[in-house]
Amino acid sequence: MHRIRAGFVIALCAFLGGCASSEKWGWYVISPTTRQGRVNIEFLLSGVGWTIALTVCCVALSIVLGFVLFLPRIPGNRWLDALNRAVVELLRSIPPLVSILWVYYGLPVLTGIDLGPFVSGMVALSLYGAAFMAEIYRGGVQSIERGQFEAADSLALSTFDKMRYVIFPQALRRSLPAMGNQFVIILKMSSLVSVIGLTEVVRRANELAVTEYRPLEIYTFLVLEYLVLVLLLSAGVRWVERRLGADEGGAASPVGRAE
Amino acid sequence: MSRSPESRPVPGGETAPVIELAGVNKWFGDLHVLRDVSLRVHPGERVVVCGPSGSGKSTMIRCVNRLEKHQSGRIVVDGVELTDRTEDIRAVRRGVGMVFQQFNLFPHLTVLQNLTLAPMRALGLSRSDAEARARQYLERVRIPEQAEKFPRQLSGGQQQRVAIARSLCMEPKIMLFDEPTSALDPEMIAEVLDTMIELADNGMTMVCVTHEMGFARRVADQVVFMDAGRIVEHAPPAKFFSAPEHERTRLFLGQILSH
């Protein structure tokens, strides 16, 4: 892993070094050695806070809403399953940009409540993410062996206790890689909220690009911003995976097996 | 109700049966897996059920704690008839332990947590009471030193003994064993059978699906032979092994005892 990351950084440095020497590039626009460059960098980075805030809110909400969406699936009732499938399909079939526009421009007409760009984006992306999270939970629970359900049943556990203490903890562990993937997607989709005016990183980059006429450098900087954010997020997910995996005394654990 | 070996009633004697199956039928789709199965088990009795695979023996004992639903006939366990009433099913399960072929321990919980979960959640024991009870039963299955380990760190035989201890922690009136030694390496079968023999000697009411005929000879009060969903032969072990009435039983015994 470390070797891959080191190789990645070296390649990136070589690329940027090549860029610096080419006439097509004008790094002065975000050069930390000049005053204007520093001001511009600060301007671009001022969007990071909104990007992170929106991502954190959407991730948290989609974890919770996804779970709520998944719950009707547990009893194995035909009608509840159908209802759940309909809701999930509906939410999944709306492109996130469309749902952002609908919530921001459409919903106030319907309800008279103007949510503003941040909350609108949060609602739209959380619902979208929740639909996928619900499917991830379902897959996690379905992957648990029938014997685990039967053992819990034979011990007279209630359905609640069976799910709470036996099934969900195991399903969650198996769902984590897929969840991490979904979080990365949510982070990247937060860029869409720039179209309704939230001053996150893309909006900031757009604003600077039209005043400085240096889209190449500015959007390259934007790419790097996302790269760093995604790497941090993935590292966080891996950390959680290790923490939870260790409890299982199995594959992810440093503790060996008896046999 | 006393369960000491001395007061064990004679099969078919005066005492009411603790398990009664009367004319039980079950289908999986078009497959008729249980055909008019009737069986009475009295307190303290040990019943060994054998038969070729697909004969319905596992399905029969799984009906006793409602892991499978029967479609006609009556099943009464400890005075409670099994119907769709969830509360009745849980009440029955509190008094009926089950040991599975694949152990079905909870892999994300330590041995101790495996043993305390159901007593705490389904019987309402305090943590300290549940742990004291768990350690007592681990002692009884002779692995008290494994309490803090995870199931995967144990050998198959140890895992199955933990599974037995987990059921015993509910202090059940009846223990069901569904091919408890079939997934074990030969050298581990003895340790599990020893545990089961000890249980039998202490007067536990047991229904065991097994092909361990030495075990059947040693502990069984009744041996039941099933074929194609029917109880074909039902006799005390002495008669069952020396003078079975049906040709099908003789054929089966010939195959299973010849090697």
Image: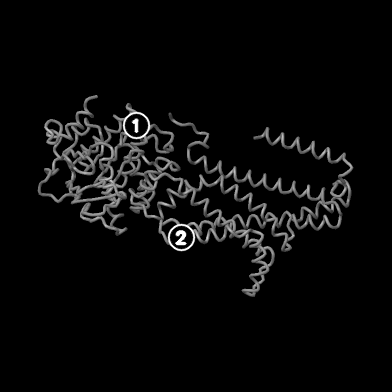
Q: Residue at x 63, y 70 (%)?
A: A107
The x and y percentages for residue A8 are: 72, 37
In this view of the protein, can residue A91 be seen by the observer? yes
Q: On what subunit does the disc labeled 2 rest?
A: A
In this view of the protein, can residue B136 be seen by the observer? no
Are the numbered discs 2 and 1 placed on the same chain, yes or no?
no
Tell me if B140 is positioned left or right of B226 in this view: right
Cα–Cα gap, marks 2 and 1: 42 Å
Q: Report the coloring of the rendering.
A: one colour
Q: Which residue is mark 1?
A: B184
Badge 1 amino acid: Leu
Tell me if A57 is positioned left or right of B76 in this view: right
Graded by Cα atoms within 10 Å as few (under 14), some (14 to 19) or many (20 or more), the crowding at tag 1 reads some
Disc number for residue A82:
2
The x and y percentages for residue B205 are: 21, 43
Farthest-out residue, top:
B259
* The quarter of the displayed image where residue A19 is located: top right
